[in-house]
Amino acid sequence: MWGTTASANPRLSDEERIDWLRLIRSENVGPRTFGTLLRYYGSARSALKALPGLASRGGAKHAARITPREEAERELAAMRSFGVRLVALGEPEYPRSLARIDDAPPLIAVHGNAALLDRPMVAIVGSRNASAAGAKMAGRLARDLGQAGFAIVSGLARGIDAAAHRASLPSGTIAVLAGGLDCIYPPEHADLLESILVDGVALSEMPLGWEPRARDFPRRNRLISGLALGLVVVEAARRSGSLITVRFALEQGREVFAVPGSPLDPRAEGTNGLLKQGATLVTEASDVIAVLEPILGCKIEPPAEEPLPAPEPEILPDTEARTRILALLGPTPVALDDLVRLAETPPAIVRTVLLELELAGRVERHRDGSVSTA
Amino acid sequence: MWGTTASANPRLSDEERIDWLRLIRSENVGPRTFGTLLRYYGSARSALKALPGLASRGGAKHAARITPREEAERELAAMRSFGVRLVALGEPEYPRSLARIDDAPPLIAVHGNAALLDRPMVAIVGSRNASAAGAKMAGRLARDLGQAGFAIVSGLARGIDAAAHRASLPSGTIAVLAGGLDCIYPPEHADLLESILVDGVALSEMPLGWEPRARDFPRRNRLISGLALGLVVVEAARRSGSLITVRFALEQGREVFAVPGSPLDPRAEGTNGLLKQGATLVTEASDVIAVLEPILGCKIEPPAEEPLPAPEPEILPDTEARTRILALLGPTPVALDDLVRLAETPPAIVRTVLLELELAGRVERHRDGSVSTA
């Protein structure tokens, strides 16, 4: 969360919302870059103005595409007519826990009962090809955690996800979609989503009409773990999407829980593996509540981030610095600190060069903050 | 292990073995009392001589039965003709790990390949009404741990025990019986025991002909855990004999392992519960080996216990001390230290009074060393 902007201006004006939407939908601007730009330039509008210059200094082969104002206006209008609200990071409706992850989406599209996002949440995920016992277990946990006051977050997938949503329909369930809110995957869960929207809520960081691609699912998974205080994995094979969600949860400092299963059942390999690595063993909802209750007690506020000074003309990186830094980059990710040390260049210059290169699509920033060539 | 006796005389003479057998088979003499008596009197023969006096001073209503010499001779002869060796604590054939538990049986009857008792051991136990998956898991672990060089210890019961024995027949398997070595329980496992005795071994602390009573099974369980470096529980209901073995294992400082199962399977309630309490999760033999290998590296010798001075006439407890101590005892177990403090009586006197009362069948000594009225 980008402190000052949010606290000075708890709700965006329509103008600002359009600017935010333009910026996040522009080429090479992900949630992290969005945050950096906002802190550098103080507002999305100033960042949009600076974007072409930054990208061209970064050596963009072609001018990076900046979303035109009209396109953003159309998206916002389409969302409103679909009954979807676009909530900005820092606004009161933005889920508090999600705001704390360092690649929080600047804008989320919210459909349904947004008030649910104010509740403490537990994510329940697992195999798409769940066993009957696994689905029953997911349902039981979702029901009991729901009755204990937790909203249940999941990904609308087949198997465990669907069982968790269904069992928490009466108490409160939250579906996080990998595509646009009108692009339901799997398609046969259109009815389930409709039931969810009666009292529950669906959300997505993608525009309406966005058909989810394979890589959108892991990206979405960071929101599932990020929304929740804890993540419960019910049945997961050795390499499964659920384990990607676990990795996000651990990076985000969320509690990880796993339901045990027979070592002879391949659907328990992932969960038993998590237990060996220290996940909390869950056989009933009280196992989850016992861990989360003390956390609920203490309100954790996101740290307010100071705005960065905008790059001033006199401290603009020279070509030499840019060349030096680029030479140090390769396909293997390198930490920012190492880069500063190896380039013998002030951190502010290194950060600016990286921002330029990022916007030019020439470097990639990784989840741990390290960078590599794209 | 009662240090000096054992090290001064690594193997008992036939005379001594008869004396040991008479003493341990005498009324009110359990393994702990046997140890105390041996340390007090230096030999089983001296203890046998002192026994009537001690018991009568303890207030025995009738003279406690002391096993006649002829009876012990007959038992020893019967064992020999059955092909069974009676191994005494402190003798080289006595299993090193078992010697370290504080209620180690003074004598064990060993049938079959005694050399196996020199190998590092893992105990595998679990439900009698095991599922097919549970039995398969027990077999797989027993086979793989066997191949890794561990002898497998179990209790010859139906279900998990039988599966563990069968799978470790080629590598080395050890059955610990609750009754005499000729009293097989359950009777239908006579064939299994026969197969075990081809290369493996069976042992018991009970005399030949002893039909096991319900209370002999928990007593036997302490030997299963005591023989092994670690105890693996494969399937166990909430209240089951396996969990009693776990309690012994923890008291004896043994590693405890549990195989996870579905929370919807009542046969996994016990094992999942153990995992919640910190048992090591096992899905394959390497999980056990990883924990036990470092322990194998360091030889742990039992501490040599100093012999206690025999009660001398001048420090014999007077009636007053005996009355004072008896008044402090009730059905609720009390620790020895508390008793010494409350009775305001020297520890040597308290210990002697307790020994007398024990031999008179008036007090009971518990596993943690505390005492109560019988």
Image (tube, coloured by chain):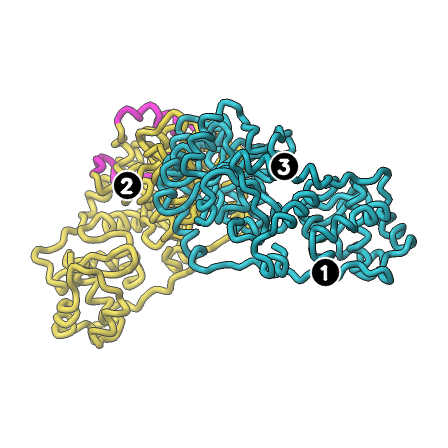
Chain colours: A cyan, B yellow
How many other residues sit within 10 Å of disc 3, few (<14), some (14-19) or many (≥20)? some
Q: Is residue B160 above or below residue A355?
A: above
**How far across and down, in percent of the image, does residue B67 sit?**
18, 48
Whether residue B208 appears in magenta in the rendering, the answer is yes
Numbered mark located on residue B239 in the image: 2
Number of numbered discs overlaid on the protein picture: 3
* Amino acid at dot 1: Leu
Query: Relative to the observer, which residue lies in front, A82 or A58?
Result: A82
Q: Is residue A258 above or below residue B33?
A: above
Q: Magenta segment range?
A: B187-213
**How far across and down, in percent of the image, does residue B317 sit?**
18, 72
Same chain for the residues at labels 3 and 1, yes or no?
yes
Which residue shows up at 72% across the image and 60% down it? Answer: A308
Residue at label 3?
A75
Numbered mark located on residue A308 in the image: 1
Q: CA distance from mark 3 to mark 1?
A: 30 Å
* Amino acid at dot 3: Glu
**How far across and down, in percent of the image, does residue A228 sit?**
49, 46
Q: Which structural element holds mark 1?
A: loop
Which residue shows up at 72% across the image and 44% down it? Answer: A29
Query: Relative to the observer, which residue lies in front, A32 or B53?
Result: A32
Quadrant assignment, res A151: top left
Quadrant assignment, res B337: bottom left
Q: Are marks 2 and 3 in contact (CB under 8 Å)?
A: no
**How far across and down, in percent of the image, does residue A353 sit?**
82, 52
Q: Nearer the viewer, mark 3 or mark 1?
A: 3
Same chain for the residues at labels 1 and 2, yes or no?
no
Quick one: which residue is furthest to the left in this view?
B61
Whether residue B175 appears in magenta in the rendering, the answer is no
How many other residues sit within 10 Å of disc 1, few (<14), some (14-19) or many (≥20)? some
